[in-house]
Amino acid sequence: MRYVIDRMTMSDVPRVIEIERLAYPSTWPASAYRKELQDNRWAHYIVLRDKKIAQEQVAVGVQEPEKARRFFPLSLLPSRQTATATSPETNSIIGFAGLWLMVDEAHITTIAMHPNYRRKGLGEFMLVNLIDIAYSIGANWVTLEVRVSNYVAQNLYRKYGFHEKGLRPKYYSDNQEDALIMWTDQIHSPEYKHKFQQLKATLLRTLETQ
Ligand SMILES: CC(C)(COP(=O)(O)OP(=O)(O)OC[C@H]1O[C@@H](n2cnc3c(N)ncnc32)[C@H](O)[C@@H]1OP(=O)(O)O)[C@@H](O)C(=O)NCCC(=O)NCCS
């Protein structure tokens, strides 16, 4: 498949911040992600890569400096492009997500797709991966907060069996918006497992064809 999920690393953080700025009205500082990755053993962060972007970037990266060096002596000086360019691997990141394990609850802290790659099933792909992580680290439930106005994300969560279980008034400091608290049922219940496996299989079939 063209899309791959990797654990987030320190070198991914600048690209994650770029996507976060495009996806959320208010954002975490880069230091918060670095701290999460370094110090929080209960945190699990992933990035979603589009291998096609990496391949295209590698092709450009191989050809451009060679061409420049052949024809323009000034290009022997470090160019601005070289100084600021990030690696093809980093540029291929198009989404990220994360959760914390608290006892036996997986708390989804963030999930965001680059706006140019939405509505392709990829946010769903990241959610599926988070739920798989929740299974693998011994969680029994998955929970999250979502803005009351964020119907798009709520639709995604409802599709995966999240239900509203409460409200946190004025939870978001940027506009005092309330947060819905959503929970799955017990993810090890046969009903949830069955529903999850069916949704996942359908999604993977769709993504294979992209
Ligand atoms: C929420 C988000 C991650 C969804 O990513 P995405 O890749 O566009 O979503 P997908 O294509 O995987 O869609 C999966 C499901 O989400 C829901 N959904 C996605 N886009 C939708 C839209 N424009 N309108 C209604 N529902 C939508 C649907 O239930 C969809 O399932 P379906 O295709 O069977 O209808 C993305 O919109 C995003 O990054 N938003 C900004 C950040 C954010 O709000 N994060 C959530 C914080 S709690």
Image (tube, grey):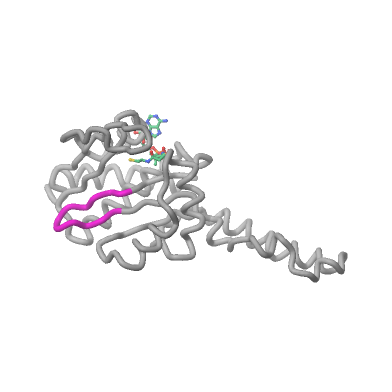
Q: Nearer the viewer, residue 141 or 3?
A: 141
92 to the left or right of 176: right
Q: Is residue 79 above or below residue 200?
A: below
Residue at point 43% right, 46% down? 207
Where residue 84 appears, as percent x and y from the top left, is 64, 61
Residue 54 part of the magenta segment: no
Residue at point 43% right, 65% down? 9
Q: Nearer the viewer, residue 4 or 169?
A: 169
Where residue 135 appears, as percent x and y from the top left, is 21, 56
Q: Nearer the viewer, residue 109 or 187?
A: 109
The tally of labels here is 0
190 to the left or right of 31: left
- Is any part of residue 9 visible from this angle? yes
Where residue 206 appears, as percent x and y from the top left, is 41, 43
Q: Is residue 73 above or below residue 198?
A: below
- Is any part of residue 122 visible from this angle? no
Q: Is residue 171 above or below residue 70?
A: above
The majority secondary structure of the magenta stretch comes to strand
Residue at point 35% right, 68% down? 38
Q: Is residue 170 above or below residue 59?
A: above
182 to the left or right of 189: right
Residue at point 19% right, 41% down? 183
Q: Nearer the viewer, residue 155 or 105?
A: 105
Residue 100 part of the magenta segment: yes
Ligand 1's image quarter is: top left
Residues in magenta, as a range: 99-109
Where residue 120 appears, as percent x and y from the top left, is 45, 40
